[in-house]
Structures are given as C-alpha cells and as structure tokens.
Image (cartoon, grey):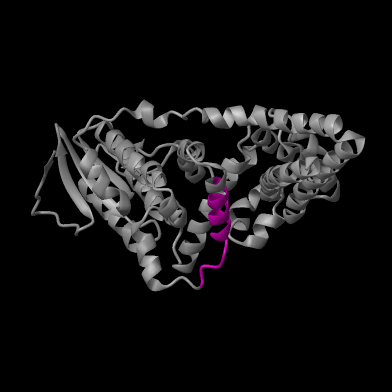
Amino acid sequence: MDAIDNPDVDYGGNVDRIQVGHKEIILVGTAHVSRESTDLVKRVIEAETPDTVSVELCPSRFQSIKQKDQWMEMDIMKVIKEKKAFLLLSNLLLASFQKRIAKKLDVKPGQEMITAVDTGEAVGAEIHLADREIRVTLSRTWRIMGFWDKLKILFQLLMSLGSVEDISEEEIERLKQEDILAAILSDVGKSLPVLKTILIDERDQYLAQKIKTAPGNKIVAVVGAGHVPGIKTHLNEEIDLSALEEIPPGKKWSGMLKWVLPMLVLALFAAGFVWGGAEAGKGMAYYWLLANGVLAGLGALIALAHPLTIVSSILAAPLTSLNPMIAAGWVSGLTEAFLRKPRVKDFETLTEDIVSVRGFWRNKVTRILLVVVFTNLGSMVGTMVAIPLMLKVLN
C-alpha cells in the first residue's frame, strides 16, 4: 500500500490517495453531520470520475435511502416473533440521535452518503456497499454482553432521546469526527472495552476489505472520518469477512441459565410445600406472581400500552418466566399489535416521529417495540426480586 501524491488535485486533509496493488483508492473521510463533507464528496467524485464509488452503507441503510417508503413493508408481528424487537428499536434510536443532531446543524442526516450515491450514479460509476449490516453489528454487540451491560446499553440508548439543544460546539465537533453508534455508547464503552472492538475495530477491517475488493481500478471510498486511520492500517491485510459477519452463539452459561432458573424456581416451590407446608408454598406462589406480574405490567404501563395489554403482561409474566421458549414481552407485544394495529399513517410518519421522545411513544410502531422491551425488562427484574423473597419464606 503506497500513498500517492497528486499535485494537480488538492482536496485537503480529508482525502487520501492510496495505491493498493493495481487499484487506486481515493479515501474521503467525512463527518456524518457536516455540510462541508457533502460538498467535498460531490467535488471529489465529479473530478475523479471513478469506476466505483464505495460508501459506508450496509444493505439495509442503503435501502432506507433508495426506498423512502420501506417502512410500509415492515411486518411488526414478524419482528416480534423473530425476536428482533430490541434490534429494531436500537436502530431507530440511533437514527433518532443522528436526525436530531443533523436538524440542529440544519443538514440532512447522512447527506454525504446520499450525495456519494447520487453523484456516483450521475458519472456512471458502480455503487458499492462497504459497511457491515447494522443488524450483524448490533447482534454481535448484544451477544458479548452480560445482563447488566445490556441494561446499560438500553439506558444509554434511551438517554440519547434527550434534547440536543444543550450539546456544546465542542461536542458537536467531536461527533463530526466519530462514529455515531460509538459516540452514543461511549459511556458504556469505558466499562466495556470490547464494544470498541465490535463497533469500530471490526468495522474498520470490514470496510478496508470491502473497499479494496470493490470492482474497478479507480475507487472513491466515502467513509466516516473516524474510520479512516483504521481503514488505512488494514488496507494491506487480508481480512476474513465471513468471520466478521458471523453471529457468535450465545454464552453456554446463558443458555443453561434459561433452563436452570425455571427448574430452580420450581424446586423452590416444591421445597416450600414439602418443608414449609401449604402456607409456605402459597407464600412463595404469592411472591412469584406478585413480583413477576406487577413489574412486567409496570413495564407495559411505562410504554403506555393498551389496558388489556397491561393485563396480558401481568398474567403472562409469571408463566413465561418459567418457560425459556416464550418471553412476556412477546405476549404483550403481539397483544398490543392486535389491539392497536399500526395504521398506514404510523409507517408514513415513522421517520419523523422518532425525532422526539413523545413521537416514540405516540407512534404505534415504536410503541409496540417499547412494550416488548419494557415488559421483558420488567419480567426479568421481577424474577430477580421474587427469588430472594421466596428463599426468605423457607427461613
């Protein structure tokens, strides 16, 4: 890999001209919320007329740009049944953060990538998607975290819904140079360094491999400025993309815990009836039903679920907590989707509603996702509260 000096064209410090084998790569580092970056991207592509324009977009993000009405095709029931509610909600929360920052700066979020695609097509270049699918990145992140780390992630994402009016100019400049996903989760990343590996380092490798294997001999690659140093480091390496796309299996202890925990609870019930008699057994059942049901119902209530959805979560949680194959959130989510089926308008206004906290709770699509996540969270906390109370009955 060799840097190329081209005295005839000087785009500034955000553009690197690199030779990798027989390919010439013009690496453009952009800020995702910068009007200047959009102008730079257009100028570089028009001047270079490359064979290929490689962009930091994954297929799903590319489709969201090309097909504005893609949300209309979403099957919310399928999302819940496939256990993708948290991933979709996370994706929407990230999009919300970027939209609000862009609105504050009076720019369109991701405009530099839109401009790269449009300008590339205008000069006859092939458009090449270089980023890893966002669902894979989030899934890999989710799999390596423990329960409390997941709670921190959820809390951090929800905190990103707050107002951006108080963000200082220094913070905005930092956001211009950082990956949006990493920026939001920076506080969690301090206590969980492996997040940086997945969110930044792995994607640097992935982007580098995809860019250098893009078709054509002259490639303009448009990526976030925060990824440029890592990409330049990995351009001369051979990266196994399949390894970076693999969703790691769940932790063995986590899978075992799904079965061990219900067995432990049932064993406690049995112990209560055998050693403590009917009164002790009834007391355990009372604590189990109360803690699971009330906290799951509270989660549904926080999500402003339909009254019947709240009732379904209260009734389902004590039973689903004993069944590793079913979650209380799935029951309440499907109930909410049935009782308050999203209308066409909800899908049409989804991208605007996610800009505000009120919009997340008002839109029927995002409210269903919130119902799933908060009910599950309430049920999990309920289980942790119930077990010590049940043990206390035996003493």
Is residue 24 shown to the viewer in this render? yes
Q: Residue at x 63, y 40 (%)?
A: 85
Q: Is residue 161 magenta?
A: yes
Q: Residue at x 76, y 33 (%)?
A: 268
Q: Is 360 situated above or below 332? A: below
Q: Is 122 situated above or below 186? A: above
Is residue 125 shown to the viewer in this render? no
**In the displayed structure, does residue 156 sit left or right of residue 193?**
right
In the image as oriented, which residue stretches furthest toward the right?
278
Q: Is 163 situated above or below 296? A: below
Q: Residue at x 77, y 54 (%)?
A: 301
Q: Position of residue 336 (x, y in %)?
A: 78, 43
What span is colored magenta in the figure? 150-165
**In the displayed structure, does residue 17 sit left or right of residue 311?**
left
Q: Which residue is nearer to you in this view: 37 or 206?
A: 206
| Quadrant position of residue 198 | top left
